[in-house]
Structures are given as structure tokens and as C-alpha cells.
């Protein structure tokens, strides 16, 4: 036998050793491949974050260029150097301001399209489609990156309010879209990995702790989105509780799904988004504690489901037209709710009744008129263009949206100097007479103010009540188009808290009465004043001709002047205002700026 011959046992041992070496080499190569893929996905996620930052940077740059142009008066200039820039910006705004089905505006749709484009680019960039798990891994990273964006867009104390003039409520639509994208990424990520391991006969992998955490994470995201789509429509307060609880589950599950800082670095994102959310909550909690000290609110029921809240202490930096979150532990111990600030000194809120908190608040106010309750507020929130930067301000409100426009008007007349040439067109469409009593004091203040001749006050009653017997007896020969309805004082207005002012009526009536068609549709209601007599408020029957009002306002100004068109109300109203105002943004006309507040959060 040759000396080089080997026994079968030795051959088997060598073969086993070789197989083991090959397996180890394959495992090492696989580990190296996984590590390289993790590194690449981390780099691409950072690039995605940079792309989002660049998109936000466009809005920051646009806002501050606009601010500089307004502050230095360049927006009014007809200098040959500035005209091209003004022309480009006005043409862009004429397009972007318009409403678009399914979106707030064309500009909103453009932003969403840019966001989707970035996700498509970085979601599929450098993907090996021959390896399905490559796509699953990338989508997991994209879901994590988008989760950070979801939290950032939900911050009440967002830095974007200062940097871009977009407060959190105006970012809410993008917050929801980013949430949908995150859920889609998570579903695809989990589905591909589950199918891969099941088909490979490695179902035991799905029972590992990190995978179990991922499954919990995916279902928490799904239920969060479903709650927003379904429960939010019927019970916002229940939705909010579910939303917060599930968010906490998401943060914990995300941390357990990627429990290390190295090599995957996923835990950095978890810690960062958790820190963002916690810091925002801490700021809000500290404000509530500070503003609760020696603070009380008197509550008063108003006709037709309204409630007035007057706070004892002012809120720092509060301005009418912005909003704040109110905590009334007597009504809800663990909830705060947002309401528009109508007046800041004293701070006043007027609230319409819907369901949940507002319904319980109104019921309590009816049973306990003038009651004083422990209260706290935090805010203020909202970004509103400064009305003092405009020659004319057109305010359009529908229903309880007048809380916004009355606040803007009151703040503006308070700040206007005696020789001011600014003008205010105030248009309010309201269903019935009872709703007028919600703002009796504010209507009288505008009509009796020293700047009243500069205020064109036009109120439209869309559901005019029948004449009272008193008025029919006083004017039996009066035609229906000239009828006058008596609006008697409510119990609240008879009380000591009512501060209506009597005095000369605004010239708004004569300004509007010069139009015969409008005069023919005009009625009058009597608003109670502090004096024994009442003052007459001219009102118009039917819905306002918003297009005509805006056209007249814009055409009354010169090319070097500026007009703000601000509206608050249902979607149908703000859609009309957006589209009509956009049509009058012209290169050779006055500068037109549009700001719309919408119902809902």
C-alpha cells in the first residue's frame, strides 16, 4: 500500500473539515454582505433626510425672501431690477394658491408630489431586485426615517412655525401623508421578510424577540392609521387617546426591533424621535402648570349652542386670531382642546358646540351661568400674516369661523394709528339671528370704534327667521325686503358681564347701501347696547357674493398697494376664497396675499 493512501475515516474527516470551512467562509461572506448592505442603507437614509431638509429649505428661503421684500417695501416697488422677481413670484403664487381636489391647494399637492418623489428615488435607489430581502431591508430603513418625519411634523412647538410661517396645524396634512407612507413601508417590509423566511423553511426566525417586536410595531402602525381614518371621524377624543397610546407602543417596539446603536444604527432614530416627542410634551406641560397659577375662567352659555370663556389671566404672546389649548379639569381632567382667541385683554374664547368636550362644556354653562372654573391654557399657536403690512384687509368668515376674523379685525383697529389709511372689509355669513348674539360686543366695538368709517361691515343671514310681532306692528306697510327683526338681548347680555358699547353706527351701512341690488336684499337687526336703546345692524339675506367682494377690494387698490384676503370657515368657503383670490394675483396689479384657516385639526 502506498504511503500516501488514506483511510475512509480520514477522508470523511477531511471532507467535513472542508465543508465546515466553506460554511464558515460563506457565513462570513454573508455577514460581510449584510454589514455592507446595512451601511449602504444607513447612508441612503441620511441622503433621504438631506433631501427632505433641502425641500424644507426651499420653503424657509421663500418665506424669508418674502419677509425681506415686505419689510423693506420692495414688494410695492416698480423698480426695473425687482420687477422680474416680483413677476415670477406672483405667477407662481397664482398657481400654487388655488385649491385642488384632494389637497388644500396646488402648492400642497406640489409639496406632496416632491415628498413622494423623494421616497421613490431613495426607496429604490441601488436596489438589487434579484434579492427580495434587499427591498425589504431598504423599506425598513425608509419606514424608520419617515417615522422621524411624522413626529417632527406633529410637534406643536415646531421650529417650522418660525422658519417657514407654517404652524403645526397647517402641517397636519403632511403629517398624515407621512404616516400613511410609513405604514405602507412597514407592511411591505414585514410581508417580504415573512414570505422569505417561510419559503426558506426558517419560520423559527419569526419567533425571535426582535422579529416579534417588529410584528407588534407593524400592527401598532396599522391600527394608528385605521384609527385616524375611521374613529377620528366619529369620536376625536377617543381617537386622540388611542393615537397617543399606540405611539408609545410604536416607540418601544421600534427600539426593541432594532435594539443596538451599532452596526445598524436604527436605535439612534428611535431615541431621536422619542426625545422630540417628549421635549414637546414637556414644554406644553410646563406652560400648563405656569398658566394655571391663580387662573380662573368664567363661562357663559350663548344662544344656539355657543359658549363664551373669559380668562382671568392673559396668555403671554397671545394675539387675536391665533389659538391656544384650554384645560378645564371640571369638564375634562386629562384633556386639552384648541380654540381660537377672539380677544386677548381680557382673553376671550367663543366656542361652538359639536360633541364630546364642547357639548359637555355648553351643558355645564347652561346649568351654571357665569360659573368660575379652574383653568389653564398653553400656546399660542398659529401663524397669521401681520395685517398692519397691508393697505386693505378682506376678512371672510362662515359661521363660528368669525372667531378668527373678529380677532384679526379687533387686533388691527387696536394697532392702527389715528391717521391710518388702512381699510377693512368684514364679510360674515351666518345662519341665524341667535348666532349674531355670540359676537354682539365685538360687532358693537367695530361699529363704534374711532376707525369705524374705515370698516366695511357686511353680515349675511343665510337663514332669516320670520318677523317678530313687535316689528310687524311697528311697520305694517313695510315690504319683506325692508323688514326689520328685533334681536332681543339674551340672558347673558343682560348680565353684568356684558360690555356692549352704544354710539354712532359705522359708515359701512352707507357704503354698502349705495348699491341698489344689495339694498333691496338688506334687512336690519337690532343689537342690544349698554344704553337703553339699541343700535341697528344692516344685514343681507342669502350668501355673500364672495367673488364680487374680492374683485372690488382688489380693484380699489393701486399697483403699489397690498391686500390681505383672510378666511375662516368650512371647506366650501375657503375653496371659493382661494380660487377667486388666486385669479386676482396679477403682475400688473396690487400685491395679493391669501390666508385660509379651516375647521378641523
Image (cartoon, grey):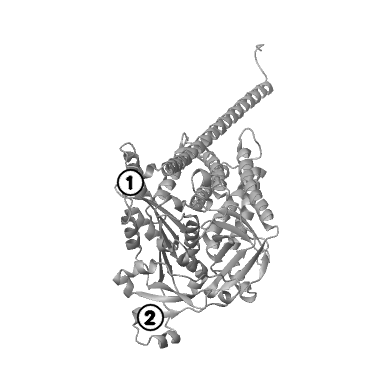
Q: State the residue position of label 1.
A: 91
- The answer to whether residue 188 is seen in the rendering is no
- Front residue of this view, candidates 135 and 268: 268
Q: Position of residue 467 (x, y in %)?
A: 42, 83
First-in-chain label (2 vs 1): 1
Q: Within 10 Å of the Cα at label 2, are there few (<14), some (14-19), or many (20+) other Cα atoms? A: many
Left or right: 274 in relation to 134: right
- Front residue of this view, candidates 454 and 137: 454
Secondary structure at numbered mark 1: helix
- Front residue of this view, candidates 496 and 311: 496
Furthest residue toward front: 419
Q: State the residue position of label 2.
A: 483
Identify which residue is drawn at 45% across, 52% down. Answer: 388
Secondary structure at numbered mark 2: loop
Left or right: 160 in relation to 279: left
Vertical side of 551 occupied by 588: above or below: above
Quadrant assignment for the N terminus: top right
Q: Position of residue 203 (x, y in %)?
A: 61, 45
Q: Position of residue 323 (x, y in %)?
A: 55, 57
Identify which residue is drawn at 61% across, 27% down. Answer: 28
Q: How many marks?
A: 2
Furthest residue toward right: 294
- Front residue of this view, candidates 94 and 487: 487
Q: CA distance from mark 2 to mark 1?
A: 46 Å
Amino acid at each position: 500500500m502506498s504511503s500516501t493512501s488514506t483511510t475512509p475515516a480520514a477522508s470523511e474527516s477531511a471532507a467535513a473539515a472542508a465543508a465546515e470551512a466553506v460554511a464558515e467562509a460563506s457565513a462570513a461572506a454573508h455577514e460581510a454582505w449584510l454589514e455592507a448592505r446595512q451601511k449602504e442603507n444607513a447612508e441612503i437614509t441620511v441622503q433621504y433626510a438631506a433631501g427632505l431638509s433641502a425641500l424644507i429649505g426651499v420653503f424657509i428661503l421663500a418665506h424669508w425672501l418674502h419677509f425681506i421684500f415686505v419689510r423693506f417695501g420692495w414688494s410695492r416697488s416698480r423698480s426695473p431690477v425687482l420687477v422680474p422677481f416680483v413677476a415670477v413670484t406672483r405667477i407662481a403664487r397664482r398657481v400654487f394658491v388655488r385649491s385642488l381636489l384632494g389637497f388644500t391647494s396646488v402648492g400642497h399637492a406640489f409639496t406632496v408630489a416632491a415628498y413622494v418623489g423623494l421616497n421613490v428615488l431613495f426607496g429604490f435607489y441601488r436596489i438589487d431586485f434579484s434579492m427580495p430581502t434587499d427591498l425589504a431591508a431598504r423599506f425598513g430603513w425608509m419606514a424608520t426615517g419617515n417615522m422621524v418625519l411624522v413626529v417632527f411634523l406633529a410637534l406643536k412647538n415646531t421650529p417650522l412655525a418660525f422658519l417657514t410661517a407654517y404652524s403645526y396645524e397647517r402641517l397636519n396634512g403632511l403629517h398624515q401623508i407621512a404616516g400613511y407612507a410609513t405604514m405602507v413601508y412597514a407592511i411591505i417590509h414585514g410581508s417580504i421578510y415573512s414570505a422569505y423566511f417561510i419559503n426558506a423553511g426558517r419560520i423559527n426566525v419569526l419567533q425571535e424577540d426582535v422579529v416579534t417586536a417588529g410584528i407588534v410595531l407593524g400592527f401598532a402602525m396599522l391600527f394608528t392609521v385605521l384609527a385616524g381614518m375611521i374613529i377620528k371621524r366619529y369620536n376625536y377624543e377617543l381617537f386622540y387617546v388611542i393615537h397617543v397610546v399606540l405611539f408609545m407602543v410604536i416607540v418601544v417596539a421600534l427600539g426593541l426591533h432594532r435594539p443596538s446603536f451599532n452596526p445598524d444604527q436604527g436605535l439612534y432614530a428611535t431615541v431621536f424621535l422619542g426625545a422630540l416627542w417628549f421635549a414637546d410634551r414637556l414644554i406644553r406641560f410646563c406652560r400648563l402648570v405656569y398658566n394655571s397659577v391663580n387662573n380662573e375662567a368664567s363661562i357663559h352659555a350663548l344662544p344656539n349652542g355657543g359658549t363664551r370663556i373669559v380668562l382671568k389671566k392673559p396668555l403671554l404672546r397671545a394675539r387675536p386670531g391665533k389659538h391656544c389649548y384650554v384645560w378645564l379639569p371640571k369638564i375634562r381632567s386629562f384633556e386639552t382642546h384648541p380654540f381660537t382667541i377672539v380677544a386677548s385683554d381680557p382673553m376671550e374664547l367663543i366656542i361652538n358646540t359639536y360633541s364630546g368636550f364642547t357639548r359637555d362644556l355648553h351643558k355645564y354653562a347652561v346649568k351654571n351661568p357665569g360659573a368660575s372654573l379652574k383653568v389653564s391654557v398653553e400656546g399660542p399657536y398659529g401663524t397669521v400674516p401681520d395685517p398692519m403690512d397691508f393697505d386693505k384687509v378682506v376678512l371672510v368668515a362662515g359661521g363660528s369661523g368669525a372667531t378668527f376674523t373678529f380677532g384679526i379685525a379687533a387686533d388691527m383697529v387696536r394697532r392702527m394709528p389715528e391717521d391710518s389709511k388702512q381699510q377693512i372689509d368684514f364679510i360674515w355669513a351666518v345662519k341665524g339671528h341667535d348666532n349674531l348674539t355670540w359676537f354682539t360686543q365685538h360687532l358693537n366695538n367695530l361699529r363704534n370704534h374711532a376707525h369705524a368709517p374705515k370698516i366695511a361691515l357686511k353680515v349675511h343671514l343665510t337663514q332669516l327667521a320670520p318677523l317678530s310681532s313687535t316689528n310687524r306692528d311697528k311697520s305694517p306697510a313695510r315690504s319683506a325686503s325692508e323688514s326689520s327683526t328685533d334681536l332681543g338681548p339674551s340672558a347673558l347680555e343682560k348680565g353684568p358681564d356684558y360690555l356692549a358699547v352704544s354710539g354712532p353706527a359705522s359708515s359701512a351701512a352707507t357704503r354698502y347701501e349705495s348699491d341698489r341690488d344689495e339694498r333691496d336684499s338688506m334687512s336690519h337687526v337690532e343689537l342690544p347696547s349698554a344704553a337703553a336703546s339699541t343700535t341697528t345692524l344692516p344685514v343681507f339675506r342669502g350668501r355673500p357674493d364672495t367673488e364680487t367682494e374680492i374683485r372690488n377690494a382688489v380693484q380699489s387698490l393701486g399697483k403699489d398697494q397690498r391686500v390681505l384676503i383672510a378666511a375662516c370657515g368650512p371647506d366650501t368657503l375657503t375653496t371659493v376664497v382661494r380660487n377667486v383670490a388666486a385669479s386676482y394675483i396679477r403682475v400688473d396689479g396690487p400685491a395679493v396675499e391669501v390666508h385660509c384657516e379651516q375647521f378641523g385639526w
